[in-house]
Amino acid sequence: MTSVDKPTDQAAGEHPHDTDTRALTQAALFDAFGGIRGTVETMVPGLLFVLIYTINKDLHLSAIAALAVAVILVVVRLVRRDTVKHAFSGVFGVAFGVAFAMFTGNAKDFYLPGMIYGTGLGAAFFLSALVGYPLLGLLLGPVFRENLSWRTRNPGRKKAYTKASLAWGLIFLAKYAILFPLYWWADTEQLGWVLIALKLPPMVLAVYFTWIFLAKAPPPIDVFAEMEAAEKAEEERKAGKSSPSGV
């Protein structure tokens, strides 16, 4: 058992987890999902697309502008030496949308790859929780330095990851249950503005539920610290054997 496993002394009525655990949870969520900045950056290309298309109905200009701003956001992060994983994922998403819309000639198809991906992701969150490998645990385990220890050694965290993954799955599936009928029945501008409106609130809600579930769960088991401690103990044992005095 590592230091993060051991219960701490607490005053009567105090919450079972300290501020450090909550801060770690918040930091891990921001790192995994890009925080507010990352979410906003994923909104800007789509917002620019629907804004330009609403004004002049020019598919090519709207698509090129959306792709250009997505690339600029990546370049800004590279220049500032910030993490680019979320920005790059945004570029790929916009590029697929642009390619699909250009191929079909239908402006609404700019949104279709992202909608299909979001639906698949929602199903993955939901199904992974049902089979005992909640996707949130697989994503956040390395961030918390616990890897898969939550599956066999920390049932409280497995339960929290399962609840959080179910929440993500239900929220995503509900979102696209609204959007797909609009894809068929609404025009490009209506679909685009509704999609923009539904971009941030579901994500914030899902992250909020994740934070609530994990903040109430047992602290993570730091398997990296355990391995480092075991390696150090083994080195000390070997050093003791090689000492002339046998100490």
Image (cartoon, rainbow, N blue to C red):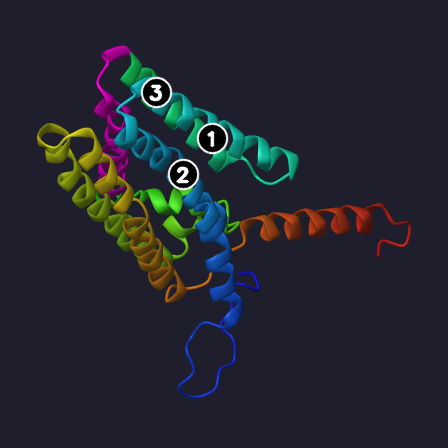
Amino acid marked by disc 1: Val
* Residue nearest the viewer, comparing 243 with 186: 186
Q: Earlier in the sequence, mark 3 or mark 1?
A: 1
Amino acid marked by disc 3: Val
Q: Which residue is mark 3?
A: 98
* Image location of residue 225, percent across then percent down: 61, 52
The residue at the point 35 percent across, 25 percent down is 62
Secondary structure beneath dot 2 equals helix
Residue 69 image label: 1
Residue 114 visible at all: no
Q: As displayed, is residue 239 above or below residue 4?
A: above
The residue at the point 53 percent across, 61 percent down is 1
Q: Which residues are magenta?
A: 103-127
Secondary structure beneath dot 3 equals helix
Which image quarter is the C terminus in?
A: bottom right
The chief SS type of the magenta part is helix
Crowd rating for badge 1 (residues with CA inside 10 Å; few <14, some 14–19, many 20+):
some
On whether residue 88 falls in the magenta region, the answer is no
Q: Do the CB atoms of the residues marked 1 and 2 lie less than 8 Å apart?
A: yes
On whether residue 108 falls in the magenta region, the answer is yes
Q: Which residue is mark 2?
A: 44
Q: Earlier in the sequence, mark 1 or mark 2?
A: 2
